[in-house]
Image (spheres, rainbow, N blue to C red):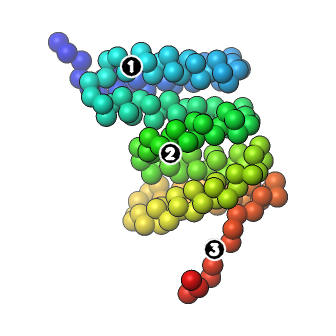
Amino acid sequence: MARLRWEWWNEVAEARQWLCFGMIHAEVPFDAYVAALKDLERQFAREARTPAERLHLKRLTAEDAVQAAFDQDRPWKDFGPWLRKLKRLGFPNLWSRFHISCLYVQSLPNFPEQARDAFAMLADTERRVLRCSKERSSRQQMLDGIAHARREAASHGILGERPLPTGWK
């Protein structure tokens, strides 16, 4: 009997979690970590049934690579290409966009020259979050995370542009 898609996606998620968990605890270098992520992506891409599934696998790989670059305090040459790839592929959901934009802003001590772009991405994410219903349970969590990311950057002397007061154009 053919495996159901949700079972396959559960297998993908479990394999990614175990890989990331193992790599973090083994303190594997960034390049080896990314190579392992790409191998896992290729393995599951062969089993993907649709282009949308392959696209989502690429997004997941890019998200994990950005997370690894953040965790290992990597410079822009490692962080930037994966962030650009993720932006090009598109974020799968608002939570992912929120997570990556917060990582980007909190990574600014490693590449402060990217501050303008990072804060623009964070502001765009904040606008999207504010459009969510107030009843949505994750809305306040995301707003708190955005405020935390700004505080982290400010603690390193990196300040985003101040929004204009209401009524200004």
The residue wearing badge 1 is 44
Q: Comparing marks 3 and 2, which lies closer to the viewer?
A: 2
Q: Residue at x 75, y 62 (%)?
A: 159
Q: Are marks 3 and 2 in contact (CB under 8 Å)?
A: no
Q: Position of residue 130 (x, y in %)?
A: 48, 66
Inspect the image, locate mark 1, and give the three-letter code of the amino acid beneath it: Phe
Q: Is residue 151 left or right of residue 5?
A: right
Residue at mark 3 to residue at mark 1: CA–CA distance: 44 Å
| Foreground of the two, 168 or 154 | 168
Name the outermost residue toward the bottom.
Answer: 167
Q: Earlier in the sequence, mark 3 or mark 2?
A: 2
| Residue 64 position (above or below residue 117) | above
Q: Earlier in the sequence, mark 3 or mark 1?
A: 1
Q: Position of residue 49 (x, y in %)?
A: 26, 24
Q: Comparing marks 1 and 2, which lies closer to the viewer?
A: 2
Quadrant for the C terminus, please: bottom right
| Foreground of the two, 148 or 34 | 34
Disc 2 residue crowd, few under 14, some 14–19, many 20+, Cα 10 Å: some
Q: Earlier in the sequence, mark 1 or mark 2?
A: 1
The residue wearing badge 2 is 87
Quadrant of the rendered structure where residue 164 is? bottom right
Quadrant for the N terminus, please: top left
Quadrant of the rendered structure where residue 152 is? bottom right
Disc 3 residue crowd, few under 14, some 14–19, many 20+, Cα 10 Å: few
Residue at mark 1 to residue at mark 2: CA–CA distance: 22 Å
Secondary structure beneath label 1: helix
The residue wearing badge 3 is 163
